[in-house]
Image: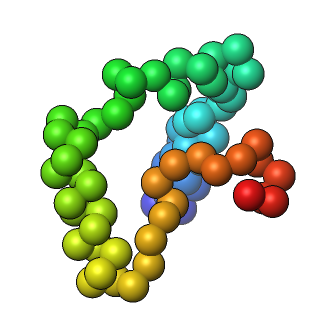
């Protein structure tokens, strides 16, 4: 019973470590910002939902990229 559990644990660890091993290259990051990658069908509805969440939650932002990644913008 213990050997079966150990084997199962090793298999799960191997499968979990195999996930996400490929990093996105710098030359491929331009495709992530493509308009096809935007999942909202209606930008007006999205803006309305953001406005409602801003008023309800008291927080805004976090939906776009402000700067170059240095944290200064």
Q: Which quadrant would the C terminus be assigned to in this image?
A: bottom right
Whole-percent x and y of residue 44? 19, 47
Q: Nearer the viewer, residue 17 or 53?
A: 53
Q: Nearer the viewer, residue 35 or 44?
A: 44
Whole-percent x and y of residue 63? 46, 54
Residue sitting at x 63%, y 41% = 17
In-image side of 52 versus 16 (left or right): left
Up/down of 40 relative to 46, above or below: above
Up/down of 39 relative to 65, above or below: above
Residue sitting at x 73%, y 22% = 26
Which quadrant of the view contains residue 38?
top left
In-image side of 33 versus 73 (left or right): left
Q: Nearer the viewer, residue 12 or 58?
A: 58
Whole-percent x and y of residue 43? 24, 42
Whole-percent x and y of residue 64? 52, 49
Which quadrant of the view contains residue 14?
top right
């Amino acid at each position: 019973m213990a050997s079966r559990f150990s084997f199962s644990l090793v298999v799960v660890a191997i499968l979990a470590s195999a996930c996400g091993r490929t990093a996105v290259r710098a030359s491929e990051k331009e495709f992530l910002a493509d308009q096809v990658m935007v999942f909202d069908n209606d930008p007006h509805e999205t803006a309305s939902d953001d406005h409602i969440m801003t008023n309800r939650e008291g927080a805004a932002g976090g939906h776009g990229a402000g700067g170059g990644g240095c944290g200064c913008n």
